[in-house]
Image (cartoon, rainbow, N blue to C red):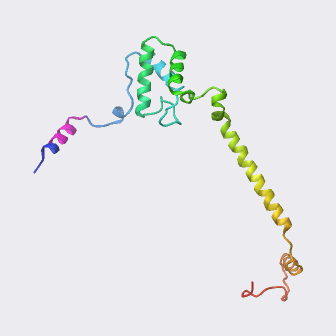
Amino acid sequence: MIYAWQMNCFAQTANTPSLNAKTLSAQPLSDNPALETQVNTISNELRCLVCQNQTIADSNADLAIDLKNQIRLLLTQGRTQAEILDYMVQRYGDFVLYKPPLKASTWFLWLGPFIILLLAFFLLWWQIQARKKLISAQQFSAVDLARAQALLNNSAPNNLVRPKDQP
């Protein structure tokens, strides 16, 4: 028995064109190639707020598509690239710029990775110094030193080798 909702699903899939590479790629929304070039130029300067490691030109996220459409609309209204970038910064902050300017509010975006790297090197240096102090403070008995010397000479005397059952 076939239910009505199943028939509706079958009808919808039968009427949909098959998916291919052409339908999966983004198609320009405007017939004006100059406008699309400007949209792509501006989109390459803005960070996708969802992906955060891609420009909105490279992202397929819904928000990125909405931002590209908004750029297209602002360009058709006669706004310049600088005005559109300023509008996006006012709305989303400096983080929306793929290359944010160096100023007081964005210094951590620029200097943060270097500060973290320097901190990691300092912690490594501090750990090495602490281990050196620990090793230099360790005292060895005459028996331990003789055993080590014998092992270095590859001729361990029988009286210096501990049996395996003794600690």
27 horizontally vs 82: left or right = left
Image location of residue 116, percent across then percent down:
68, 43
Please report the residue visible at 27 percent of the width from the left and 37 percent of the height from the top. 18
> Is 40 a magenta residue?
no
Image location of residue 60, percent across then percent down:
42, 34
Camera-nearest residue between 22 and 132: 132
Query: In the rendered view, would you say 127 is above or below 88?
Result: below
Camera-nearest residue between 59 and 70: 70
Please report the residue visible at 72 percent of the width from the left and 88 percent of the height from the top. 165
Please report the residue visible at 70 percent of the width from the left and 44 percent of the height from the top. 117
Say whether residue 13 is visible: yes
76 horizontally vs 3: left or right = right
Q: Residue furthest left?
A: 1
Q: Which residues are magenta?
A: 7-16
> Is 15 a magenta residue?
yes
**In which quadrant will I find the C terminus?**
bottom right
Query: In the rendered view, would you say 15 is above or below 84?
Result: below
Query: In the rendered view, would you say 11 is above or below 98?
Result: below
Image location of residue 99, percent across then percent down:
60, 28
Image location of residue 151, percent across then percent down:
83, 78
Say whether residue 33 is visible: no
99 horizontally vs 51: left or right = right
What secondary structure do most residues of the magenta stretch adopt?
Answer: helix
